[in-house]
Image (tube, rainbow, N blue to C red):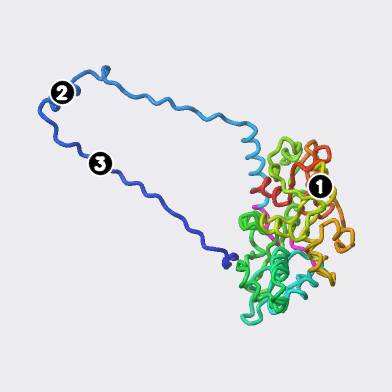
Amino acid sequence: MSNSLVTLPAQFFYNQKWTDVTTTSPPSSPKIAKRNQTMKDEPTGVQFEMEIEEKKPQVDEKDISYQKFRKKFSDFLTKFTCYDIMPTSGKVIVLDSQLTVQPALQAFYENDINACPLWDSKVCNYVGMLTIADLIQVLKRIYSHPETPELQGYKIEAWRDILKCRPLIYGHPSDTLFQTTQTLLKYKIHRIPLIDKENDNTILAIISHYRILKFLMNNVPKKNRSFLKTKLGDLKIGTAEDVLTVHSDTSLITILDHMLEKKISAIPIVDIDGNLVEIFSKDDVVALAQHPKFFKSFSKSVSEVIALGMCTTPRDLCTCTNDEKLRIVVERLLERRVRRVIRLDEGKVVGIISMTDILNFLVG
């Protein structure tokens, strides 16, 4: 079967070669030679030897248990292929790279998708994935250059060249779930199309973090789920330091700048006391873009935008606390079909845990 990830960037491996080097001492004087000969004739017991005390590293039993736990999850995913989690029926939205941005945004909104493959009719092949992050970059550039209205007429193909988007990363249905998960985590992508290159170059499905995580939770034997019973406060998972939050009077353009700079998909909105009141995500941008006065909203505060009903996505705050077990949090994410949960301590934001964080914790 052909290599299913032919478009991935090349990997280079460097081999270290060790060479034995023999050193030759310079000729010594007769006195030194005589002294050396005397030392050789002396009993071994009088010679001084340097003893290096070898310190054994301390073993963390908890860390060993965690590694065993991860290995069980990794071994489990190795036994299955993408065929095992592909839906029995469904549709895959594919956009032509000759479209402009507005029809693409409408397709995202109407089909409730976060990314989709791009087809280039010139080369008759898939050339990449269009994501909400790409669209946000495009919208921000259009807003930042009002003197160039023709930017709105640029095709996606042109925008991909401007933004220097990466080529398509894809998998094959016969790839193991472990391979697919590692690809998702390595390239920091949330979904990967499965393409059957041998039969008409068809995209059979798109595999996401959600689908892999749901398969794990439904099928991993209970005896292998030890760490899922651990409280979040005892685990190093997700973002727990320097959590980015904004106030409700923060402008929309500032929030979009934060998202692009930090490469994050959502930002918690807090009051003056640091209590969580709202969350703004990339999904909101797609809904906003359907509004006729979309670009005028960039200078408005995020609270104004939400109050005006310009964000039509469900305002579902998915939260957790340090006292909750990891299993409960994972089940909550899957049930609500959200990509992140906000960790709170007495109402204040202290962390964020995403599906990416959870997959990385389990098998990364």
Which amino acid does the dot numbered 2 rest on?
Answer: Arg
Q: Position of residue 36 (x, y in %)?
A: 17, 25
Q: Position of residue 233 (x, y in %)?
A: 74, 36
Q: Which residues are magenta?
A: 78-90
Q: Nearer the viewer, mark 1 or mark 2?
A: 1
User: How far apart in space, not on screen, are marks 1 and 2 (Cα)?
Assistant: 81 Å
Q: Position of residue 231 (x, y in %)?
A: 76, 36
What residue is pinned by disc 3?
22
Which amino acid does the dot numbered 1 rest on?
Answer: Val
Q: Which mark is residue 35?
A: 2
Q: Position of residue 136 (x, y in %)?
A: 72, 65
What residue is pinned by disc 1?
270
Q: Residue at x 71, y 41 (%)?
A: 224
Mark 2 lies on a secondary structure that is: helix
Q: Residue at x 14, y 27 (%)?
A: 32
Compared with residue 310, is residue 178 higher up or lower down, i.e. above or below? above
View extreme (left): residue: 30
Observer able to see residue 48: yes
Q: Nearer the viewer, mark 2 or mark 3?
A: 2
How many residues crowd around disc 2 within 10 Å: few (fewer than 14), some, or many (20 or more)? few
Tell which of 258 and 17 is nearer to you: 258
Tell which of 271 and 100 is nearer to you: 271
Compared with residue 94, is residue 246 higher up or lower down, i.e. above or below? above
Q: Nearer the viewer, mark 3 or mark 1?
A: 1
Mark 1 lies on a secondary structure that is: strand
